[in-house]
Image (cartoon, grey):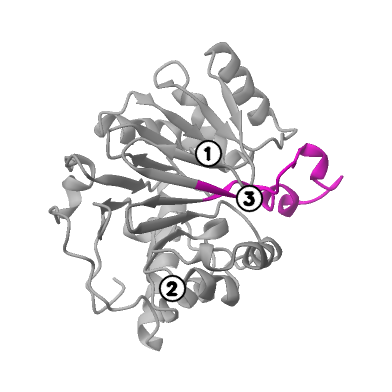
Amino acid sequence: MGNRTNSSVRAIVNVFFLLLIALLGWGCASAPVASSPAEPAVESTIFEYKRADDELLMWFFFLEDDDRSGDAILVMLPNGETMLIDAGIEAAGSQLKHHLDRLGVTHLDYAVATHAHNDHIGGFLPLFGSVTMDDYVTVNVPHSTDTYARVMRGLGESEIPITYVEAGERFSLPGGVEVLVLNPPAGTTGDDVPPGSDAAGLNNLSLVFRLDYGEVSFLFTADIYRARESALIDTYGDVLDVDVVKVPHHGESTSSSSSFVDAMSPEYAVITINILQSLPIYQRYGKSGAQAFITGIDGTVLLICDGSSIAVHAEHPRDSDSLF
C-alpha cells in the first residue's frame, strides 16, 4: 500500500477529472445496465455473488498502489473453472491474493499472461506456492527483466506447464466458451521485438483474444498500440465487434484510436488502471455509446453473463446521471 499523502493526491486528481467531465457534459452512455441475470446488492456482493450453473463471471480487479498497478482479471467459467488474465505488479500481489481468497479461489485452471511487462506478470510471483495452476498461457516473446526471470523460474519450480499461443488458434473451453486468438501474428518470437525498442515493441506483440459465451462476446486487448489496432482492423474486421472490451493499454492515449473503438462498438468498456491516464480516451468510449468503467474510480467491476445478457456491477457505483 502507498503512503497516505500520495494516495490522497491521486484521489484528488481523479475527483478533479470527474468534476471536469460532469461540468462539460461528457461521460458514459446513460443506457441502463442489463437487469438479467441477477442483480446483486453491490458493495459486499461483488466478492460474495454465487454463480448460477449457466453463468460466466468476470472480475476486473482494482489494485491499489502509488505506481500503475496493471491488469488482473478473473474469469469463472460456467462449469466453475477459473482463468486469471494477468496479475498486476508484484507489489500488489498480496491484494490480488486477498481478492482470490475472498472468492474462494485456490486453484487456477488457466493462468494467462498477455505479455511479459511487470504490471502484467509481477503479481503471479506471490501466488506461486499458495495458488495451484494447471497451465500458464502466454506469448512466445520473452523479456530481459528480473521479474520475468523470476516468474519463469517460479513456473519451473512449481512444475506448471507453459502453453504459447498465437493468432489463428481457437480453443473450446468447458461450458460452451470459445476463444479465438487475434494477436500476436502467427510465428511471432522474441526476435520480432526490434532491438532497443521501447515498450511499444513488446506491447504490440501482446496477447489479444476474443472470448464468446453464447450470444455475448468479450475482447481482451492487452497493451496494443494504435498501429497494431489498425492491423487488427484490416485483418479481422467485424470479428472485433463485441459487447465488452478490456480497454487497451490501461486507457492511455497510445491506444483506442477512433477507428478501433468504432470497430469494436462495445456496450461496456472497462479501463483497468488505478490512476486515470487519459480523459479524452475515457470520453471516446462514452461518446461511442459504451458504458465505461475505470477500476481506479469504480473499484472492482463484476460482469455476470448467462450467455444472452450481461449485468455489470461496480464496487463503488455511480449515480446513472453523474460520474461521482
The amino acid on which the numbered mark 1 sits, given as a three-letter code, is Ile
Q: How many angstroms separate mark 1 from mark 2 (CA)?
A: 25 Å
Which of label 3 and label 1 is nearer to you?
3
**Where in the figure is residue 92, as x and y percent of width and height?**
46, 37
The amino acid on which the numbered mark 3 sits, given as a three-letter code, is Asn
Helix or strand or loop: what does disc 1 sit on?
A: loop
Helix or strand or loop: what does disc 3 sit on?
A: strand
Which of label 1 and label 2 is nearer to you?
1
Q: Nearer the viewer, residue 93 or 189?
A: 189
Q: Which mark is residue 89?
A: 1
**Where in the figure is residue 173, as x and y percent of width and height?**
40, 37
Q: Which mark is residue 183?
A: 3
Q: Residues within 10 Å of mark 2 (few under 14, many from 20)?
A: some
The amino acid on which the numbered mark 2 sits, given as a three-letter code, is Phe
Q: Nearer the viewer, residue 174 or 24?
A: 174
Residue extent of the magenta highlight: 180-209
- Residue at numbered disc 2: 17
Which of label 3 and label 2 is nearer to you?
3
